[in-house]
Image (tube, rainbow, N blue to C red):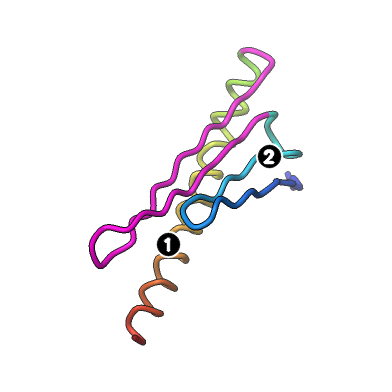
Amino acid sequence: MITTTLETVRFEPPERVHFRLVRGPVPYVVEQFHLRESGERTELEYSGELGTDLWAIGSSWGALVAPRWEAAVRSSVAAIQAEAERRAARR
């Protein structure tokens, strides 16, 4: 199954990025990336929530979609980390 998603993105410089699902495979997703300085490093904290409807059917669908969503988030965070480390090494 191919699903198209549409999200809104809101920036709260310099420390937060918020995402909200407008259209996608589930009725409700909100996510936030929070950056904070920690000495010489920057810490990235991710939080997200996926919501479903239609009781047991929605719960089953959420259980199917959630692992793919979590894998996409892990992949994005890994890419962000790799690029940040690459840029830090150039300094």
Q: Would you call the spot at circle 1 few (<14 residues within 10 Å), some (14-19), or many (20 or more)?
A: few
- Closest to the observer: 24 or 56? 24
Q: Residue furthest left?
A: 39
Q: Which residue is mark 1?
A: 78
Q: Which mark is residue 21?
A: 2
Q: Quadrant of the N terminus?
A: top right
Vertical order, 83 against 48 (above or below): below
Q: Would you call the spot at circle 2 few (<14 residues within 10 Å), some (14-19), or many (20 or more)?
A: some
**Kind of residue sitting beneath label 1:** Ala
- Closest to the observer: 41 or 59? 41
Left or right relative to 56: residue 38:
left
- Closest to the observer: 50 or 47? 47
Which residue appears at 41% of the width and 54% of the height? Answer: 35
Magenta stretch in the rendered image = 28-55
Q: Is tag 1's residue or tag 2's residue first in the polypeptide sequence?
A: 2
The quarter holding residue 87 reads bottom left
The quarter holding residue 62 reads top right
Does the magenta run of residues contain 37?
Answer: yes
Helix, strand or loop at label 1? It is helix
Q: Position of residue 13 (x, y in %)?
A: 53, 56
Vertical order, 66 against 79 (above or below): above
Q: Quadrant of the C terminus?
A: bottom left
